[in-house]
Image (spheres, grey):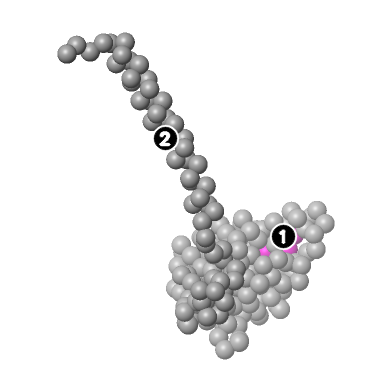
Amino acid sequence: MRLNPDNFGARLVRLAAFMAAAVLLSGCDLQDMYRQPKTEPYMSSPVFADGTSARPLEADTVARGHLRTNEVFYTGKLNGKEVDALPFPVTKAVLLRGQGRFDIFCSPCHDRAGNGNGMIVQRGYRRPPPYHTPQMRAMALGHFFDVISNGFGVMPDYAAQIPVEDRWAIAAYVRTLQFSQYAPLADVPAGERQKLKEAAK
């Protein structure tokens, strides 16, 4: 039996048209998936005894990353009192990280030396207290962490912008800035003490 090329082509066109129509018609049923019976969050539902569709969390459920059992690390306090030590070892890398974060987030107000005369202050923002006053030098390290975390006065909190560990690194760097201005002479190497005495004359 010989196939007529013209008949074959016509059949192929009809078959393709049929398949396209079937696909288009089946697409109409896709809306039924959207309109199907379902419950939205917090809407009422007769399915559960409490009458709501949302299921309560299991007791003692904690979202990932939110189990904050280390009070000192996350608050800067122990039994409500500000701590005066970092909750992890102080290393050169920690201080360099603190310096970098300080320069980004803190120096616009506090300036890079911690004198409270940053560019924003020079343009009219309220001046923060210098870090080098006796009162500020007496503050516990946890105080600086707490202020970064929760804000103080006109200073906003930076909890959303600065991770917890970086807040501690900044606090450690603030202490380094303070120490740089008021280091005891006994901590200066013996060979350098004479130079300092001569420079002070």
Q: Is residue 176 visible?
A: no
> Circle 1 sits on which residue?
109
Q: Is residue 38 visible?
A: yes
The answer to which quarter of the image holds residue 105 is: bottom right
Give the answer, above or below, for where 29 lies relative to 6: below
> Circle 2 sits on which residue?
22
Name the foreground residue: 190 vs 88.
Answer: 88
Q: Position of residue 58 (x, y in %)?
A: 47, 79
**Extreme-right residue of the structure:** 124
Side of 162 where 26 appears, left or right: left
- Residue at 69% of width from left, 75% of height from top? 136
- Residue at 26% of width from left, 11% of height from top? 4
Name the foreground residue: 57 vs 119.
Answer: 57
Label 1 is placed on what type of residue?
Cys
Q: Are marks 2 and 1 in contact (CB under 8 Å)?
A: no
The answer to which quarter of the image holds residue 18 is: top left
Give the answer, above or below, for where 97 lies relative to 31: below
Tell me how far mark 2 sits from mark 1, CA to CA.
Answer: 68 Å
Pointer 2 local density, CA inside 10 Å: few below 14, some 14–19, many at least 20: few
Asked which secondary structure carries label 2, the reply is helix
Position of the N terminus, as image quadrant, is: top left
**Magenta range:** 113-117
Q: Position of residue 171 (x, y in %)?
A: 58, 70
Name the foreground residue: 129 vs 81.
Answer: 81
Side of 110 where 92 appears, left or right: left
- Residue at 19% of width from left, 11% of height from top? 2
Position of the C terminus, as image quadrant, is: bottom right
Our reading of the magenta stretch's main secondary structure is loop
Label 2 is placed on what type of residue?
Ala
**Extreme-left residue of the structure:** 1
Q: Position of residue 82 (x, y in %)?
A: 60, 83
